[in-house]
Image: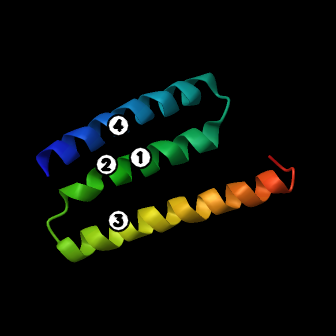
Amino acid sequence: MNLIRIALAGGALVYAVLFGIELIRGHVLWQAVVGIIAVAALALLPLTKNEHQLHDGEMIAVWTCILLFGLYAILKSGGMV
């Protein structure tokens, strides 16, 4: 579990830096802010001691990714993206 936490923290740091660069450039201001918050929340998820809370957080993250991918597919097929 310790290696998972380190890998997750490293990935979160990389994405936070990328979002920070976009925030500084001002291209996607709100998306960068939401991205930083989301990455920070996901990086802190495995630090919880409550297994039920950890499971709930993981399921929310998984289903959010699935639904956003589906939304992207719908928008792409409709020519909106």
- Dot 4: within a 10 Å radius of its alpha carbon, few (fewer than 14), some, or many (20 or more) residues? some
Q: Which residue shows up at 16% across the image and 43% down it? A: 3
Secondary structure, mark 2, is: helix
Q: Which residue is mark 3?
A: 58
x, y percent for residue 47: 19, 56
Q: Amino acid at mark 3?
A: Glu
Q: Kindly report the distance in space between the C-alpha atoms of the residues bearing marks 3 and 4.
A: 16 Å
**Disc 2 or 3, which lies upstream in sequence?**
2
Looking at the picture, does residue 67 appear above or below residue 25? below
Q: Is residue 40 found left or right of 78 in the rendered image?
A: left
Residue carrying label 2: 43
Please identify the quarter of the rendering in which residue 27 is found: top right
2 and 1 marks in contact (CB < 8 Å): yes
Q: Earlier in the sequence, mark 2 or mark 4?
A: 4
Q: Please report the residue visible at 61 percent of the width from the left and 22 percent of the height from the top.
A: 25
Q: Where is mark 1, residue-wise?
A: 39
Residue pointed to by mark 4: 11
In terms of secondary structure, where does tag 1 sit? helix
